[in-house]
Image: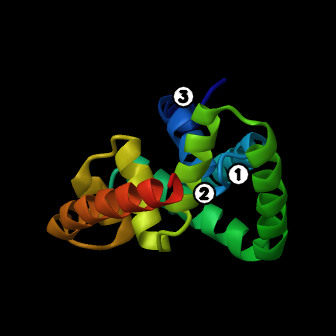
């Protein structure tokens, strides 16, 4: 017999699995297998800590916070490995990809130049998370989120244009 907790978890999972995956994908520079592993780890943590949810925010906000924290912890734990892996991938991309794929790689490289908070804001904005919710997730005011989004867009535009010269 399925409990209410299991039903609620399944609903949270089905409503957010794609968003969590894309958010993880942004943190691991487009690496699908790593993003899938992180996504699974996120939902395992959500299940393990289901009863610790305080209810002060929406469950989806709590889920995004767990996702961001899980991704940041992974990056801290694997900093050197990911840098070497990215360097190797960039060399392969430059040699073999078509123009459109190169543009995506450039965009990811520019995104990775953002600080952690701005990167989180950008990825959540791309997932169409409401700005009020983004503010709650990253711990800043709503107006600051709007300002940062505009500045992030300007930074990325400059970076992408510079990288394509």
> Is the Cβ of the residue at disc 2 closer than 8 Å to that at disc 1?
yes
Q: Residues within 10 Å of mark 2 (few under 14, many from 20)?
A: many
Q: Is residue 9 left or right of residue 80?
A: left
Residue assigned mark 1: 38
The local secondary structure at tag 1 comes to helix
Asked if residue 56 shows in the view, the reply is no
Image height of 9 relative to 153, above or below: above
Q: Nearer the viewer, residue 112 or 77?
A: 112
Q: Are marks 1 and 3 in contact (CB under 8 Å)?
A: no
Decide if residue 117 is on the left or right side of residue 92.
left
Q: Is residue 24 above or below residue 8?
A: below
Residue 139: which disc?
Answer: none
Closer mark to the observer between disc 2 and disc 1: 2
- Where does the N terminus fall, quadrant-wise? top right
Q: Are marks 2 and 3 in contact (CB under 8 Å)?
A: no
Tell me the number on the disc at residue 14: 3
Confirm whether residue 165 shows in the render: yes
Query: Residue at horizontal 46%, vertical 63%?
Result: 119
Residue 22: x percent and y percent?
56, 41
Foreground mark, 2 or 3? Answer: 2
**N-terminal label among 2 and 3:** 3
Q: Secondary structure at mark 3?
A: helix
Label 2 and label 1: CA atoms lie apart by 10 Å
């Amino acid at each position: 017999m399925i409990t209410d907790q299991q039903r609620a978890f399944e609903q949270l999972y089905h409503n957010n699995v794609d968003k969590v995956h894309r958010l993880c994908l942004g943190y691991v520079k487009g690496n699908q297998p790593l993003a899938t592993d992180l996504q699974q780890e996120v939902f395992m943590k959500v299940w393990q800590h289901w009863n610790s949810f305080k209810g002060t925010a929406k469950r989806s906000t709590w889920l995004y916070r767990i996702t961001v924290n899980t991704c940041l912890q992974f990056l801290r734990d694997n900093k050197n490995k990911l840098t070497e892996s990215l360097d190797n991938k960039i060399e392969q991309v430059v040699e073999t990809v078509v123009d459109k794929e190169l543009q995506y790689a450039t965009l990811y490289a520019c995104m990775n130049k953002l600080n952690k908070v701005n990167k989180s804001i950008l990825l959540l904005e791309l997932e169409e998370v409401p700005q009020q919710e983004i503010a709650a997730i990253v711990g800043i005011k709503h107006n600051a989120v709007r300002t940062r989004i505009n500045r992030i867009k300007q930074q990325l535009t400059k970076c992408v244009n510079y990288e394509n010269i």
